[in-house]
Amino acid sequence: MIRGLKIVSIPVTDQDVALAFYTEKMGFKVGTDQPMWPGQRWIELIIPGADTRLALFTPQGHEDRVGGFQSMTFWCDDVFATAEALKARGVTLAEEPTKQPWGTYAKFRDPDGNEFVFSSR
């Protein structure tokens, strides 16, 4: 039976720029960084304390998926504190923290314009 998500890919145009952003500004760790084919590496990132990994990878023919809203949500303990910490590291928020009847969330953008939600668990 399926037991969870192992890897979620984030489409990027420049793997070096994305790697610097996700490690230096978001605080993720490198799980693996190895060659795949010319011009493309397989980069897996570890989110400290999480089982799911992120891959900075754009399959050939899927370049049109870079930028815009990405359909994944990160969770955190406190959206307001996380938003302040990310802004202090230079991360651009696409939307400030907002409380809704269904929960609290905010959005951030990476260097490629990919936009992600983060919310309290």
Image (cartoon, rainbow, N blue to C red):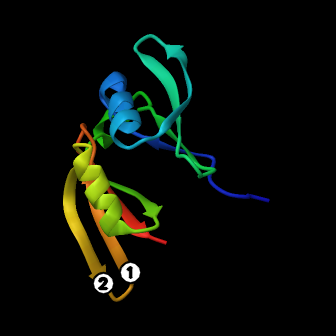
Q: Amino acid at mark 2?
A: Gln
Residue 5, position as x, y percentages in the image: 62, 53
Q: Amino acid at mark 1?
A: Gly
Q: Quadrant of residue 117?
A: bottom left
Q: Which residue is mark 1?
A: 103
Camera-nearest residue between 34 and 83: 83
Please report contact status of discs 1 and 2: CB closer than 8 Å, yes or no: yes
Camera-nearest residue between 95 and 72: 95
Residue at image x 38%, y 80%? Answer: 103
Q: Is residue 103 left or right of residue 33?
A: left
Q: Quadrant of residue 95?
A: bottom left
Task: Name the secondary structure under disc 2.
Answer: strand
Residue 44, position as x, y percentages in the image: 54, 33
Residue at image x 24%, y 48%? Answer: 88
Q: Which mark is residue 100?
A: 2
Residue 101, position as x, y percentages in the image: 34, 89
Q: Is residue 99 above or below residue 56?
A: below
* CA separation in Å, label 1 and label 2: 5 Å
Residue at image x 42%, y 61%? Answer: 73
Task: Name the secondary structure under disc 1.
Answer: strand
Q: Is residue 111 left or right of residue 78?
A: left
Residue 60 visible to an observer of this rendering = yes
Report how many numbered discs are placed on residues in the image.
2
Q: Is residue 67 above or below residue 31?
A: below
Q: Which mark is residue 84?
A: none
Q: Is residue 116 left or right of residue 59?
A: left
